[in-house]
Image (tube, grey):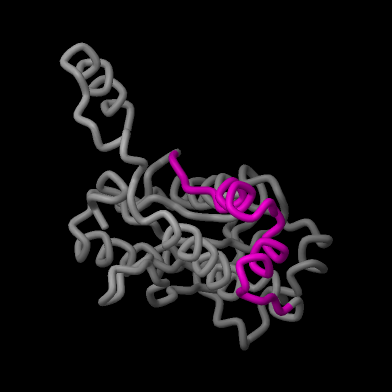
Amino acid sequence: MAERFRGYLPVVVDVETGGFDWNKHALLEIAAIPIELDAAGNYVPGEVAHAHIAPAPGTSIDPKSLEVTGIKIGHPLRGEVDERSGLDAIFAPVRAAVKKHGCQRAILVGHNAHFDLNFVNAAVARVQHKRNPFHPFSVFDTVTMAGLAYGQTVLARAAMAAGLGWDPSQAHSAVYDTEQTAKLFCAIANAWKKPYPAAQVAPSASSAGTIGAMDGAD
């Protein structure tokens, strides 16, 4: 795993939120699934980590977002936790998976991945979390991957094109969307298990310094 993705472990993440602005809207639900390898060397979804999160102080909620997600804030069956506890519930198993595979850190996989990453980063900043396992700005976006592989960019259509099916009644649940996105990522990654051969050629002496400088930006 570490060799295939340059030391990064792909971890699929989906968030449900109180709106589109990560600077002011609340993070309400988050799920994450590390990508694993089976005995045959295929990429498969790992175990899901999940948390319902109470709106953090100072954040707001657009009522229209709740109409889409169906989230009932404060409902006793939601089992809400504070934002710090919710992040801990996700980060701890992700760090364990990173260590298991000998990777240096996790890289977020998502459908419109920067939306998810921005909300995660905003929550991390609010609680001043010091053990965020995710790369701060790099992602694998299944919108791009599915557009290339299947000619589809909407998650539901991409999942159906990949033969995964889609249940509209479960959509906009962080767990369901994460599970479907993980299956989609694995379907595409398993069709292209090795990098393009030219990418495996060692860099020339003249380019080594440039590549080293680029690595420093990571």
Instruction: State the count of labels.
Output: 0
Quadrant the N terminus occupies: bottom left
The residue sitting at the bottom extreme is 77
Which of these two is toward me, 214 or 63?
214
Q: Is residue 12 magenta?
A: no
In which quarter of the view is residue 192 placed?
bottom left
**In the image, is residue 139 part of the stretch drawn in magenta?**
yes
The structure residue drawn at horizontal position 46% and vertical position 64%, both measured from the top left corner, is 186
Residue appearing at x 33%, y 27% in the figure: 217
- The image shows residue 95 at horizontal and vertical percentages of 28, 61
Classify 144 as above or below 200: below
Magenta residue span: 138-167
Residue at (69% x, 54% y) in the render: 152
Q: The C terminus is located in which quarter? A: top left
From this view, report whether residue 96 is shown above or below residue 135.
below
Q: Where is residue 125, by image quadrant? A: top left
Q: In this rendering, would 75 be left or right of 149?
A: right
Picture coordinates of residue 83 (x, y %)? Answer: 49, 62
Nearer to us in this view, 144 or 70: 144
Q: Is residue 132 visible?
A: no
Residue 166, by quadrant, is bottom right
Instruction: Specify whether residue 137 is in view.
Output: yes
Q: Can you give x and y, in whole percent of width and height, for residue 205 in the image?
A: 16, 15
Q: Is residue 133 left or right of residue 208?
A: right
Where is residue 7 drawn, in percent x and y?
A: 25, 47
Could you say which is closer to the camera, residue 111 or residue 190? 190
Residue 80 vertical placement versus 35 (above, below): below
35 left or right of 4 in image: right
